[in-house]
């Protein structure tokens, strides 16, 4: 990070000095939080301030910005956000309108490759059905008895059980803008704040303080109430048909459902050391090629634990948020230039079943080696006679 010639290390030193010199440590924490967030988002803040100023007197420019048309609920919410200290108190907690939550989750899904695999339930529901169907169809005469049956299994996902807490800073420069620009800032910052938490919940949520992640079992819990981790498969060494057979059998429920594209989630470090050497090999014509025999897409993410990889599919995990409550950070005093608010997102998530994802030991992957074939060239009669000395 390099903002106005201030490096990340220099910013850290500045924060530490602020803390050391402060008589009121709580207020210093508040000031530090505001400074860090404003420095981090300075480019976005400056951009929106400039756009707001130009759009105020240039209607054509405003149209080109394609600003969101706010509903009455959204306008009311953002009007309150302009004076957070009065709008949000311990006695009156505002809830972010459903439209904002849905748009934010849509932005998060677009920005995160991992979350693009997730289905998000609408924000205005408190419970959501998660399930799949399987069955058989049998041809026969019209008078034949029904020979096939379709089974459907559904589970209810309670979207109000878990809470994801995020901290947001609303600078005065943003609160002074027109509401559509306040909306652009708020949804951008909320999406950024929520993204890591949602990814972590999707991957390794423990089922007690968060959703059940795909690395854990849905209905098997330890004594402390957290979900049991899935058994790590240690037999995946290559991306060949035989090497991926156990993975495909599990994901397809032994052939009962189609897999489509196979997604491999891994830590960026493991991608470099284990995944890429196994997935890409030199071709006879030069360069490198993807050696997988089927559609396989890798998604590196720092939230995936090192040493583990995950094979999964799209659309088999549902996550939802039924509401986001906001409150002021009540351990601080009022400030003129920024407000720190706390957002608590009521959300949950789970996969259709435990077979939707396979956790494997990524360190067992072997580097791809181009097969070498020995070709025997038939000898001519003269060559044979020369070798026998005849």
Image: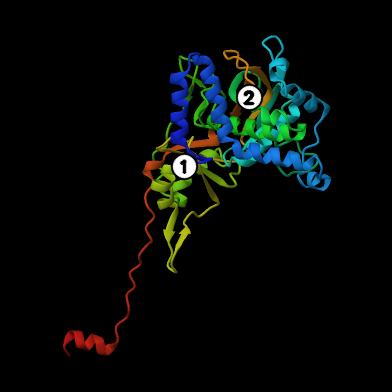
For the residues bearing labels 1 and 2, Cβ distance under 8 angstroms = no
Q: Quadrant of the C terminus?
A: bottom left
In this view, 189 is above or below 263:
above
Up/down of 283 relative to 10, above or below: below
Q: Would you say residue 230 is visible in this rendering?
A: no
Left or right position of 58 against 322: right
Residue at the image position 79 percent from the left and 23 percent from the top:
76
Is the residue marked by circle 2 packed among few (<14), some (14-19), or many (20+) residues within 10 Å? many
| Residue 259: quarter of image | top right
Q: Position of residue 287 (x, y in %)?
A: 44, 64
| Circle 1 or circle 2, nearest the eye | 2
Disc on res. 246 = 1
Tell me which corner region of the image, top left, top right, bottom left or bottom right, holds residue 75: top right
Residue at the spot 60% in from the left edge and 14% down from the top edge: 333
Where residue 62 appears, as percent x and y from the top left, is 79, 44
Could you say which disc has been placed on residue 120 in the image? none
Q: Nearer the viewer, residue 52 or 275?
A: 52
SS at mark 2? Answer: strand
Residue designated by label 2: 338
Q: How is the image coloured?
A: rainbow
Q: Residue 322: horizontal and vertical position, in percent?
A: 69, 23
Q: Residue furthest top?
A: 91
Q: Residue furthest left?
A: 389
Query: Is residue 353 found left or right of 324 in the rendered image?
Result: left
Helix, strand or loop at disc 1? helix
The answer to which quarter of the image holds residue 33 is: top right
Residue 157: in sight, yes or no?
Answer: yes
Residue 209 locus on image (x, y percent): 54, 19
| Number of residues whose C-alpha sits closer than 10 Å to that of mark 1, classed few (under 14), some (14–19) or many (20 or more) | some
**How many angstroms separate mark 1 from mark 2 (CA)?**
54 Å
Q: How many marks?
A: 2
């Amino acid at each position: 990070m390099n903002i106005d010639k201030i490096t990340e290390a220099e910013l850290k030193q500045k924060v530490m000095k602020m803390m050391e010199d402060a008589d009121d440590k709580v207020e210093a924490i508040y000031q530090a939080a505001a400074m860090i967030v404003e420095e981090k988002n300075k480019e976005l803040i400056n951009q929106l301030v400039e756009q707001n100023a130009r759009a105020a007197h240039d209607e054509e420019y405003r149209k080109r910005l394609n600003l969101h048309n706010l509903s009455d609920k959204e306008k009311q919410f953002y009007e309150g956000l302009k004076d957070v200290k009065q709008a949000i108190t311990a006695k009156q907690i505002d809830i972010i309108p459903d439209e904002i939550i849905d748009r934010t989750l849509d932005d998060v899904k677009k920005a995160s490759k991992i979350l693009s695999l997730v289905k998000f339930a609408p924000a205005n529901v408190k419970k959501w059905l998660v399930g799949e169907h399987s069955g058989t169809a049998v041809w026969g005469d019209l008078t034949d008895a029904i020979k096939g049956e379709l089974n459907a299994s559904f589970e209810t996902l309670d979207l109000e059980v878990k809470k994801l807490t995020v901290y947001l800073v609303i600078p005065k420069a943003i609160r002074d803008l027109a509401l559509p620009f306040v909306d652009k800032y708020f949804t951008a910052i909320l999406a950024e704040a929520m993204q890591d938490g949602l990814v972590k919940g999707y991957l390794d949520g423990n089922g007690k303080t968060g959703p059940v992640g795909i690395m854990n079992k849905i209905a098997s819990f330890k004594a402390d109430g957290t979900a049991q981790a899935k058994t790590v498969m240690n037999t995946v060494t290559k991306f060949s048909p035989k090497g991926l057979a156990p993975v495909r059998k599990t994901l397809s429920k032994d052939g009962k459902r189609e897999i489509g594209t196979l997604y491999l989630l891994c830590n960026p470090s493991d991608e470099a050391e284990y995944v890429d050497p196994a997935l890409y090999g030199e071709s006879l014509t030069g360069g490198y090629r993807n050696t997988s025999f089927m559609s396989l897409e890798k998604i590196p993410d720092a939230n995936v634990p090192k040493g583990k990889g995950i094979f999964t599919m799209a659309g088999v995990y549902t996550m939802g948020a039924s509401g986001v409550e906001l409150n002021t950070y009540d351990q601080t005093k009022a400030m003129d230039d920024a407000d720190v608010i706390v957002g608590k997102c009521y959300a949950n998530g789970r996969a259709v079943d435990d077979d939707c994802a396979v956790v494997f030991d990524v360190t067992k992957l072997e580097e791809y080696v181009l097969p070498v074939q020995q070709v025997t060239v038939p000898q001519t009669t003269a060559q044979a006679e020369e070798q026998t000395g005849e």
